[in-house]
Image (spheres, rainbow, N blue to C red):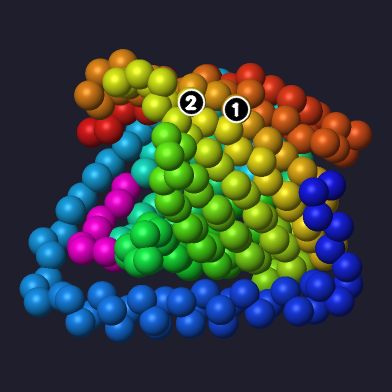
Amino acid sequence: MLVQQSTAQRQNGAAIVPMIAGIAVALGVSSAAQAHTIATPDFSVQVGVASEYVGKGLGKSAGDPSVNGTVEVSGGDFYANVFASTAKLSQGSDAEIVSAIGWRPDAAGFKFDLSVVNRDLPGTRAGVDANFWEYQADASRKLGPVNTRLRVNYTPDGFAATKEAWWVELQGTVSVGPKTKASAAIADRTADGGAEYAAWNVGVKHKLTEKLALDVRWYDTDSHALGENYDGRLVGALTFAL
């Protein structure tokens, strides 16, 4: 594991929530001071198909293909979106719906994305907690030719028996052509009552047309003994922006 989180660390872990709130307030003051008009809302829709649905490094459709879609409305730095994908989990879940409200300000040379996320898994058998909240903060910055992103995702009470959980991920992306980008990411998950593992992925995304893109990526974890969904897998995904 990249991080072995102690019990004491978990007890202090929730400190990131007020920290994220503090960052949001500080950046909000700066953003409000510069805003003079309300931006006209923008709408975007994207649909996709993948050889397998993958979330937080794990296979979530039992090796079967999946279809997905995203709808987003944004105004200025603020946005709301909904993502949905078919899934196939051991607890009976046949889909995953992720709804988010967020804010994407720029400050001190960084691009931030601060969001509150609701995650729901329809079809989950009765008695299993399948709806929960997440708090997520991204900080992105270009370092030379590499676009970097640090993501911290915190769940106070997660899926099924999982209570507090963290997902910390570092990603790097570089352009290898006018329409092609290569990227790699490494992440660590720690959880109270849930699986703990390290995950990584590496792949290439190529724009076939202005609206159609193909992503081919290898996903893997360090915990194959936990089940087939933790095994390495090559995933191809097509996305189309409407």
**Residue receiving disc 1:** 202
How far apart are labels 2 and 1 at the CA level? 8 Å
Q: Which residues are magenta?
A: 71-78
| Element type where label 2 sits in the image | strand
The correct choice, above or below, for 97 with respect to 236 in the image is below
Q: Is residue 5 magenta?
A: no
Report the front residue among 176 and 82. Answer: 176
Where 107 sits versus 206, above or below?
below
Q: Is residue 179 above or below residue 162?
A: above
Instruction: Decide if residue 82 is on the left or right side of residue 131.
Output: left
Tell me, for residue 87, which label it has, or none: none
Residue 182 is labelled as 2
Q: Is residue 60 visible?
A: no
Q: Position of residue 37 (x, y in %)?
A: 8, 73
Residue drawn 39% across the image and 81% down it: 26
Percent from the top left, x then y, of residue 41?
16, 59
The residue under the point 69% across, 23% down is 233
Q: Quadrant of residue 89?
A: top right
What type is the residue that disc 1 sits on? Val
User: Do residues under tags 2 and 1 come within 8 Å of each other at their CB atoms?
Assistant: yes
Q: Horizontally, is 12 left or right of 72 in the view?
A: right
Rate crowding at label 1 as few (under 14), some (14 to 19) or many (20 or more) other CA atoms within 10 Å.
Answer: some
Residue 224 visible? The answer is yes
SS type, badge 1: strand
Q: Position of residue 163 (x, y in %)?
A: 76, 67
Q: Nearer the viewer, residue 154 or 98?
A: 154
> In which image quadrant can residue 100 be found?
bottom left
Q: Is residue 139 left or right of residue 90?
A: left
- In the rendering, at what x and y percent does residue 101 appear? 39, 65
Q: Residue furthest top?
A: 208
